[in-house]
Image (cartoon, helix red, strand yellow):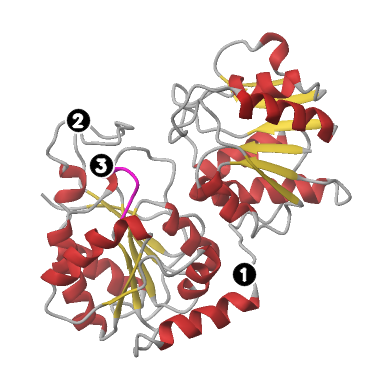
Amino acid sequence: MLCVRLDALGDVIMTSPALEAVKRSAPDRRVTLLTSPSGAQAGRLLPCVDEVWVYEAPWMKGHPTGESAAADREMISRLRLGAFDAAIVFTVYSQNPLPAALMCWFAEIPLRAAHCRENPYHLLTDWIPEPEPDSYIRHEVRRQLDLVRHIGAETTDERLFLQIPDSAFDTLDEIVGRLRTQVDGAVAVHAGATAASRRYPAEQFAVAADRLARTLDAPIIFTGVESERALVESIRARMNTPAYSLVGRLALPELAALLTRVRVLISNNTGTVHVAAAMGTPVVDLYALTNPQHTPWRVPHRVLFHDVPCKFCYKSTCPQTHHDCLRLITPDEIVEAAAELVGLKSGSPPEKGLHLVHTRA
């Protein structure tokens, strides 16, 4: 079976319960994941996926420049040679599944299933009419579980999951050994995000990180990809407390290994949140109100936001320029949320579930 999920790492992680359902419904079935280079990082850590194919679709954000369709023709040929008996196209409701469905039709895959808003006619053999957002909005994990249920794939285990090799923990130990700090019990901070609209201001991150270090009596460890180094260094330069950077040093397995050892993750709404959720690590999610579907799943968490009239804008940059949905979250509110999650303000562990915290004006 071909499973198509062409967006980013976090989206693939949120699809992992649905992929697990596909595998469990027919254990002898071979599951191939067609995904982006970013998504492939997660796909390779999913035991329910037998093979990962990488494809940069021209209808997806981030496609490399150029007008040649050679790679697309090559992928259609590869799909045809794969002789798949079925294809499931996973999308968020703002995406159109039909370009991927057309490729599967050209590849003569007999069963083609997806949510779709418009009538796909022959492109989809199993058309699930798109109910979102007009009727309701589901969490992304629930949306994909509902999709595979339509073709008879179900699971009682709805947790996110990544299988981390033992070597990742060994590599992590080597890397953090050079920091001369303690990772166990640290606070991880992920300050980056691909979209500017989802980044908490650097100067406020610095204040929050300083207060977290003092309140939780824990070292602060920044994570991120190489392109986020300047951002993280600007935050560290504003801090009064020493903080440590692993920016650009961790591949996904090592990042996941790190997140099993920290007390809590403080992060913008980005893929690292879903890595933490898969590892069972508590999360304080600084949640720009661009999309309501991607909150932490089945893990203790607090989702912080400031309510604004322009919420759920789905924009990469703030169209109003004020960025109030994030900017008006105070550092003290971040510290309070983290303290609650690590149990400093409660005698019992935090319950699992969705915790949306509308911050004060």
Residue 88 in sight here:
yes
Residue type marked 1: Ile
**Residue visible at 33% across and 77% down?**
346
The residue stretch that appears in magenta: 192-197
Spatial CA distance of label 1 from label 3 is 31 Å
Q: Which quadrant, please, contains the N terminus?
A: top right
Q: Residue 178, relative to residue 59: is it above or below?
A: below
Q: Earlier in the sequence, mark 1 or mark 3?
A: 1
Q: Is residue 313 left or right of residue 152?
A: left
Q: Position of residue 144 (x, y in %)?
A: 60, 39
Q: Position of residue 35 (x, y in %)?
A: 60, 41
Q: What is the quadrant of residue 70 in the picture?
A: top right
Q: Which mark is residue 197?
A: 3
Residue type marked 3: Ser
| Magenta stretch contains residue 28 | no
Residue type marked 2: Pro
Q: Secondary structure at mark 3?
A: helix
Q: What residue is pinned by disc 1?
A: 164
Q: Which mark is residue 319?
A: 2
Q: Earlier in the sequence, mark 2 or mark 1?
A: 1
Q: Provide the major secondary structure of the magenta segment.
A: loop
